[in-house]
Amino acid sequence: MTNRSADDVHRALYAIARRLLPGKRAGDTLQPTAVAHEAWIRLENARSSWVNAEHLPALVAQTVRSVLVDHARQRSAAKRGGGRLRISFVPGDHAARGDVDVTDLLALDEALREFAEKHERAARVVELRFFGGLTVVEAGTALGIAPSTVDDDWRYARAWLHRALTR
């Protein structure tokens, strides 16, 4: 997402949101357009803190995660736990293979926070790939590591998170 125009960033946000919220299900209150707009507003408000364009992919991933988690918390509080937001756990380039797993966003966020305490880089890989929609190569570039390392971290993180989420 480096050196992109505002329209390009907004389109990328919408594409990420559409991937994370693939279809309307009964009880859904959050639409991809709303996620993209809210993330855009938060990114614009944080524009002065952007160090440079290379930090944008990480900031986008963090912002999308924040928007989704905030919405899920609000919904859960409003329904006293009955309003969990479920999203597709499909990383950017795995979607084409039909590698779909639907999980509870609040549970994923909690597990990812726990995982990050011991495996910070691998947790950043998950954030960039899942919430930012980056490919292995793009995530490697953003983190300054080899694509093979991103792939290793991604596989390890997915296995750890799967185990944590199915306990």
Image (cartoon, rainbow, N blue to C red):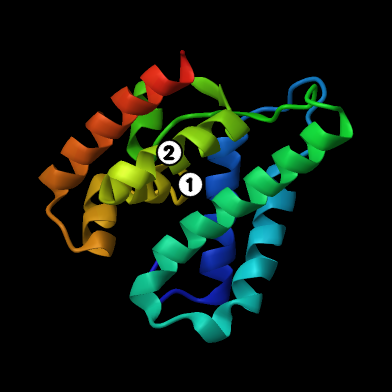
Residue occupying image coordinates x 53% and y 66%: 9
Q: Nearest the camera: 6 or 145? A: 145
Which residue, given by chain and number where applicable, does mark 2 sit on?
114
In the orientation shown, which residue stands out farthest toward the bottom?
48
Residue 50 appears in the rendering = yes
Residue 99 seen in the figure: no
Amino acid type shown at disc 1: Phe
Which image quarter: residue 114?
top left
Residue at figure coordinates x 38%, y 82% from the top left: 52
In this rendering, would 151 be left or right of 59?
Answer: left
- Would residue 72 be found to the left or right of residue 78 on screen? left
Label 2 sits on what residue type? Glu
| Position of residue 139 in the picture relative to residue 72 (left or right) | left
**Residue 28: x, y in percent?**
78, 29
Point out which mark residue 63 bears. Answer: none
- Identify the residue at image location x=60%, y=70%: 43
Residue 131 image label: 1
**Which of the marked residues, 2 or 1, is nearer the chain's N terminus?**
2
Q: Between residue 112 and residue 57, name the one nearer to us.
A: 112
Image label count: 2
Residue closer to the observer: 94 or 86: 86
